[in-house]
Image: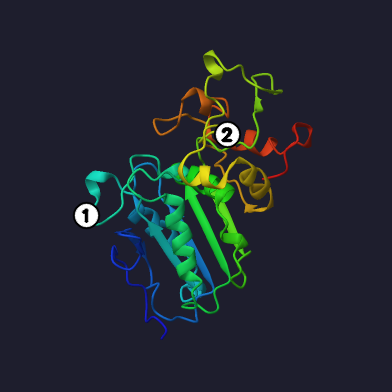
Amino acid sequence: MKSSGPTMQKIDATLQIDSGKIPYWRNRPIDTYDPSVTRAIIVIHGSRGNAEGYFHRINNIIPSTWKDRALVIAPHFQKKAQAQKGEFWWDGDWREGGASGGVSSFAVVDTLVARLRDGTFPNLMWVVIAGHSAGGQFTQRYAAFTDINLQPAPLAALVKFVPANPSSYVYLNEYRMSSDNTWVVPQRNGSGESYNQFEFGLDNLYDYAADRGAEWARSHLPVCRVELLAGTEDIVADSGFDDSCPAMWQGHTHVRVRHTAFAHRAPAIGMAAF
């Protein structure tokens, strides 16, 4: 039966993963048959965990002609102190697929997508995973390690990943751009220490990413539909910017991080486009 309109509320009962639950916001039920839906947008919040705010930002800009066809979901990767009994939580590691509170944040989105493709939305075509800032970090790393675009479900390949304004990405090799705009392998001491560890590179993978492996990421990310976004005026490293040494090897502002990551496609360093 077609939904009569958006019902906006936090839900912690419909998405069950093993023994726990994940709260999220949505503009229509995900367990009610709805043939009108053709596109689903899963938006990932930033470091402050404002899932509700990100939900409203996306839901409010959907054109009126798309309102009946677009499903918006905003999962909440909450802190331990915020979690209700039986809910999963994360100790800051959700942006790289960590499982500190019992389940990987990447597995949560895998589960959401599988639920959307279980026949409840028979005309669903595109699934878009989008995130801003820390959510952008999640989105790009998730693209590298997930397999939602390789599932046997009809139209499974129609997945787009849209990371916007992240402070860092996961790089697929050890090269980074130096201050003179040449590609170098930083020395593993001083300012280069740990620059290629996960979540910035593919060394020392853990949880979901370790289960997939570095070679998976190297082969999978280049074939994904990924659109890197950065505001051209975002040239100030504010309090929300990651200024750790590994992150600074990728750029000193959000827009510089994006331009450097885009340049990292260069064939000269043996890396396909992402």
Amino acid at the residue labelled 2: Val
Name the amino acid type tagged 1: Gln
Residue 62 in picture, x, y percent from top left: 48, 65
Q: Looking at this rendering, what residue extends furthest in the top direction?
A: 190
Pointer 2: what residue? 257
Q: Is residue 87 left or right of residue 213?
A: left
Question: In the image shown, does 111 or 41 lie closer to the viewer?
Answer: 111
Crowding near the residue tagged with mark 1, few <14, some 14–19, many ≥20 C-alpha atoms within 10 Å: some
Residue 18 horizontal side relative to residue 129, left or right: left
Q: CA distance from mark 2 to mark 1?
A: 36 Å
Instruction: Judge whether residue 273 can be spotted in this image.
Output: yes
Rendered location of residue 261, percent (x, y): 63, 36
Q: Quadrant of the C terminus?
A: top right
Q: Residue at x 57, y 29 (%)?
A: 196
Disc nearer the start of the sequence (2/1): 1
Vertical placement of 121 versus 250: above or below?
below
Instruction: Look at the image and tell me whether residue 164 can be seen.
Output: no
- How many discs appear? 2
Which of the labelled discs sits on residue 256, or is there none?
A: none
Residue drawn at 42 percent across, 30 percent down: 238
**Label 1 belongs to which residue?**
84
